[in-house]
Amino acid sequence: MFDRTTPKNRQLAIVLAVASMTIPVAGFHKFYLGQPVWGVIYLLLSWTPIPHIAAAIEAVWYLTQDSTQFETNFNSPISGTSSPMLVAQPMTTISESIRELDKLRADGLISEYEFEQKRRQWLDRV
């Protein structure tokens, strides 16, 4: 639906999140920001108020972030996370980062899909 390699625009993300609050179908902002799993979850739950409330919270979050925070969260080589452990690291620590990422997956804090996506991004840098 949206290209995952182009830089994401904060204003467009805010508009899409606000639209997700008001239209019957929610989650377009998640697809735009490169989070298709969450986008599908929002679409599946669109008949409930849950994704609409979440979209309202996210619209405020995107609005209150400065440009640097938004860039770090959604336009960095490893995007979609604000966790310091998952931020891009030097080449020498990629294997350590993958091990830590695997621990997060084993603990159930991230999905298998997210693990594989981040692992591939890190290995592509080698």
Image (spheres, rainbow, N blue to C red):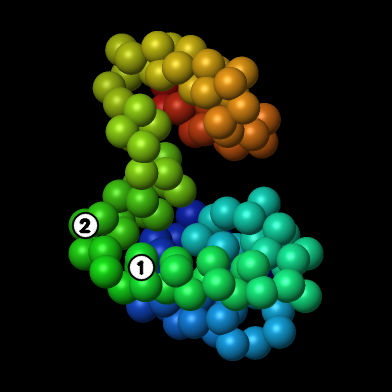
- Determine which residue is flagged by label 1: 62
Instruction: Say whether disc 1 or disc 2 marks the residue closer to the N-terminus.
Output: 1
Residue 25, percent from left and from top: 71, 79
Image quarter in which the N terminus is found: bottom right
Q: Nearer the viewer, residue 79 or 5?
A: 79
Element type at marker 1? helix
Residue 42 tag number: none
Marks 1 and 2, Cα distance to the nearest angstrom?
A: 11 Å
Q: Residues within 10 Å of mark 2 (few under 14, many from 20)?
A: few
Q: Where is residue 58, by image quadrant?
A: bottom left
The residue shown at (27%, 22%) is 90
Residue 3, percent from left and from top: 56, 62
The residue shown at (58%, 33%) is 110
- Name the amino acid type tagged 2: Thr
- Name the amino acid type tagged 1: Tyr
Residue 126, percent from left and from top: 42, 21
- Determine which residue is flagged by label 2: 68
